[in-house]
Image (cartoon, helix red, strand yellow):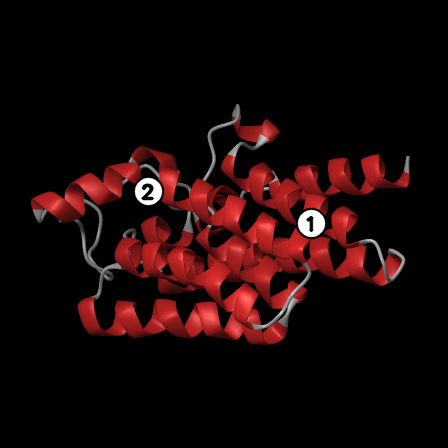
C-alpha cells in the first residue's frame, strides 16, 4: 500500500508542468504554442524570458529531486525497488502528465533532479556531460542525448543497486525516444541552438 501511495504521489508531482505555470506567471505565451512546442525550459527560453526559463528548469528538476529524496528518506534501507519505481513514476509524470492530457515535456530537467537525489555524483556527472556538449555545440538536444547515453554507464561505475541502474536505463531510453524529432533535425542540420528565440 505504501508503495502505491509513493508511486501515485510521485506521478502526480511529475505531472505538474512548471513551463506552463511559469509562462502564465510571466504573462508569456504557452510554450506548447511556439518553437518546438515542448513544455520545457529550453523552449521557454525561446520566448526571450531567461528568468522564466530558469524557474522552469529549477521547478522541473526540483520535483524530480523531491520525489526521490522523500522516498529515500521514508523507505527502509533495503527498499531499492520502491525508490526505482518512484524514480520512474515522477519522470513518467513529466513525460505524460495527467494535467496536460498526457502531453508533457522531454524530461531532461526532471531526470537531472532524479539523478541528483539518487546519487549526487551520478547527477553531477550527467550534468557535466550536458554542460560540456551544450557549451561547445550550443545544442540542448544533443547535450541531453549524450547525458542520457552516459547516465547508465555512470550508475554502473558508481556501483549503484541494480534496480537503480535498470531504472536509469529505462529513463534514458525514454528520454532518447522523446527526442526522436530532435534526432531527425540534428541529422538534417535543422536543430535550433540554445538561445534562439521563437520563430528564429
Q: Nearer the viewer, residue 119 or 110?
A: 119
Q: Nearer the viewer, residue 171 or 56?
A: 171
Residue highlighted by disc 2? 179
- Left-right relation of 91 to 57: right
Q: Residues within 10 Å of mark 2 (few under 14, many from 20)?
A: some
Examine the rendered structure and indicate whether residue 36 appears above or below residue 41: above
Image quadrant where one finds the N terminus: top right
- Left-right relation of 144 to 160: left
Residue highlighted by disc 1? 84
- Provide the secondary structure element on which disc 2 rests: loop
Which numbered circle lies on residue 167? none
Q: Nearer the viewer, residue 190 or 33?
A: 190
State the residue at coordinates (36%, 51%). Answer: 44
Residue 93 coordinates in the image, percent (x, y): 60, 38
Q: Image quadrant of residue 9? A: top right
Residue 154 coordinates in the image, percent (x, y): 50, 68
- The mark that comes first in sequence, 1 or 2, is 1
Residue 54 coordinates in the image, percent (x, y): 44, 63
Residue contact at pointers 1 and 2, CB within 8 angstroms:
no
- Provide the secondary structure element on which disc 1 rests: helix
Q: Which residue extends farthest left?
A: 189
Q: Is residue 177 visible?
A: yes
State the residue at coordinates (65%, 65%). Answer: 160
- Left-right relation of 186 to 153: left
Q: Residues within 10 Å of mark 1 (few under 14, many from 20)?
A: many
Residue 100 coordinates in the image, percent (x, y): 53, 29
Q: Is residue 29 visible?
A: no
Report how far apart the C-alphas of labels 1 and 2 lie in the structure.
23 Å
State the residue at coordinates (59%, 29%). Answer: 99
Amino acid at each position: 500500500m505504501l508503495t502505491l501511495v509513493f508511486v501515485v504521489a510521485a506521478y502526480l508531482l511529475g505531472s505538474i508542468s512548471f513551463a506552463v505555470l511559469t509562462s502564465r506567471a510571466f504573462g508569456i505565451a504557452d510554450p506548447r504554442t511556439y518553437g518546438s512546442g515542448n513544455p520545457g525550459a529550453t523552449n521557454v527560453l525561446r520566448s526571450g524570458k531567461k528568468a522564466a526559463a530558469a524557474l522552469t528548469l529549477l521547478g522541473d528538476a526540483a520535483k524530480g529531486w523531491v520525489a526521490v529524496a522523500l522516498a529515500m528518506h521514508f523507505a527502509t534501507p533495503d527498499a531499492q525497488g520502491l525508490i526505482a519505481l518512484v524514480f520512474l513514476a515522477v519522470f513518467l509524470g513529466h513525460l505524460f502528465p495527467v494535467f496536460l492530457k498526457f502531453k508533457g515535456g522531454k524530461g531532461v530537467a526532471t531526470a537531472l533532479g532524479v539523478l541528483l537525489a539518487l546519487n549526487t555524483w551520478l547527477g553531477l556527472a550527467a550534468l557535466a556531460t550536458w554542460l560540456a556538449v551544450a557549451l561547445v555545440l550550443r545544442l540542448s538536444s544533443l547535450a541531453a542525448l549524450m547525458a542520457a547515453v552516459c547516465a547508465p554507464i555512470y550508475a554502473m561505475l558508481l556501483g549503484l543497486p541494480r534496480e537503480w541502474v535498470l531504472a536509469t536505463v529505462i529513463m534514458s531510453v525514454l528520454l532518447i525516444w522523446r527526442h526522436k524529432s530532435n534526432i531527425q533535425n540534428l541529422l538534417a542540420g535543422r536543430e535550433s541552438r540554445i538561445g534562439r528565440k521563437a520563430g528564429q
